Amino acid sequence: MTNDIKEGHVRVEDVTINFAGKSGPVTALDTTSVELKPGTFTALIGPSGCGKSTLMNAIGGFVTPSTGRITLDGTPITGPSTKVGVIFQQYGLFPWFTALGNVRFGLKRYGLPKSEEIDRARAALDEVGLGAHADKFPQQLSGGMKQRVAIARTFAVGPKVLLMDEPFGALDAQTRLVMHDLLLDVWQKHRATVLFVTHDVDEALLLADDVRVMSQAPGRLIRHYEIRQPRPRALSRSGSDLLATRDEIIDLLRPAGALADVH
Ligand SMILES: Nc1ncnc2c1ncn2[C@@H]1O[C@H](COP(=O)(O)OP(=O)(O)OP(=O)(O)O)[C@@H](O)[C@H]1O
């Protein structure tokens, strides 16, 4: 998708990440270079343990690369920042705050006047369709509703980059479809650069501009698919291109296919 968005440009340059394991160093991410262009939506898919979360945590500033570097808009990422929002499968909501309180908490660091903070939090909840549930506590909300609160909390802060680690993995199939539409709607309004980790090939193809496939551990990027079908997409009426891509990715994720050459 062409766009005139200038911020949220992520470059990962020759990054490897090693951790200290019980029996010596473990390579969690093999040499990886990738560019996330401003305002684009990239899905990252790969076998379990290949290093998807490690790459995401490095872009989030939670993990330091062992070699190489990661920049956001030309500046090296050296730690967590409000420019990079994060949404995990576990909603990360405070149980003692209402939905509104949770969104307000994310805004606290800005030191806004109380009325403005409340207005912004309410607007964010309206945007995800939860305006009528602002005063409910997380335990009174369904999984999909909790994830809506997490999305509202993150977008309210105005991140340039949004990292999502299997955000809908715990939701049922029907709720996931609703959440896909909601996420695309909110993303298209805010146009943060999104990196979305998933195990679900269909989810990647329905949502992303770019699908990046990783090899078995120690992971590296082995394939890049540019998906140019207009959204909203449905695999059942998407024509043969998307279905052929889907078959290819499923093959790549099989242990033998995952050793294929880099493209
Ligand atoms: N802090 C850590 N210390 C030691 N090893 C780690 C650490 N974090 C991750 N690893 C190891 O690095 C490898 C990659 O882990 P990572 O969680 O990034 O994989 P993943 O692709 O996200 O897996 P999954 O799809 O199962 O969530 C694994 O072998 C994991 O055990």
Image: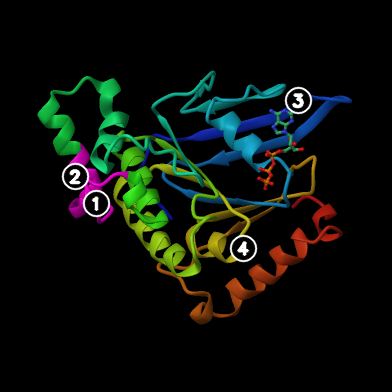
- The numbered mark, 3 or 2, whose residue comes first in the sequence reads 3
Q: Is residue 118 left or right of residue 10?
A: left
Q: Which residue in the structure is indicated by mark 2?
A: 123
Element at label 4: helix
Residue 174: x %, y % from top left: 45, 70
User: Residues under labels 1 and 3: Cα distance?
Assistant: 40 Å
User: Residues under labels 4 and 2: Cα distance?
Assistant: 33 Å
- The numbered mark, 1 or 3, whose residue comes first in the sequence reads 3
Q: Answer yes or no: do the residues labelled 3 and 2 have beta carbons within 8 Å?
A: no
Res 16 quadrant in image: top right
- The numbered mark, 4 or 2, whose residue comes first in the sequence reads 2
As for residue 29 lying within the magenta part, the answer is no
User: Residues under labels 4 and 3: Cα distance?
Assistant: 28 Å
Please identify, in this view, whether the residue under mark 4 or under mark 3 is nearer the observer: 3
Q: Which mark is residue 254?
A: none
The quarter of the picture showing ligand 1: top right
User: Residues under labels 3 and 2: Cα distance?
Assistant: 42 Å
Residue 201: x %, y % from top left: 61, 63
Q: Closer to the camera, 90 or 37?
A: 90
Q: Closer to the camera, 106 or 163?
A: 106
User: Residues under labels 2 and 1: Cα distance?
Assistant: 6 Å
Q: Total number of numbered labels?
A: 4
Identify the residue shown where x is 61% and y is 32%: 12
Amino acid at the residue labelled 3:
Phe
Q: Answer yes or no: do the residues labelled 4 and 2 have beta carbons within 8 Å?
A: no
Residue 79: x %, y % from top left: 52, 20
**Dot 1, crowdedness within 10 Å: few (<14), some or many (≥20)?**
some
Q: Which mark is residue 127?
A: 1
Q: Which residues are magenta?
A: 121-137
Q: Which residue in the structure is indicated by mark 4?
A: 201
Identify the residue shown where x is 56% and y is 25%: 62
Kindly tell me whether mark 3's CB lies below 8 Å from ligand 1.
yes
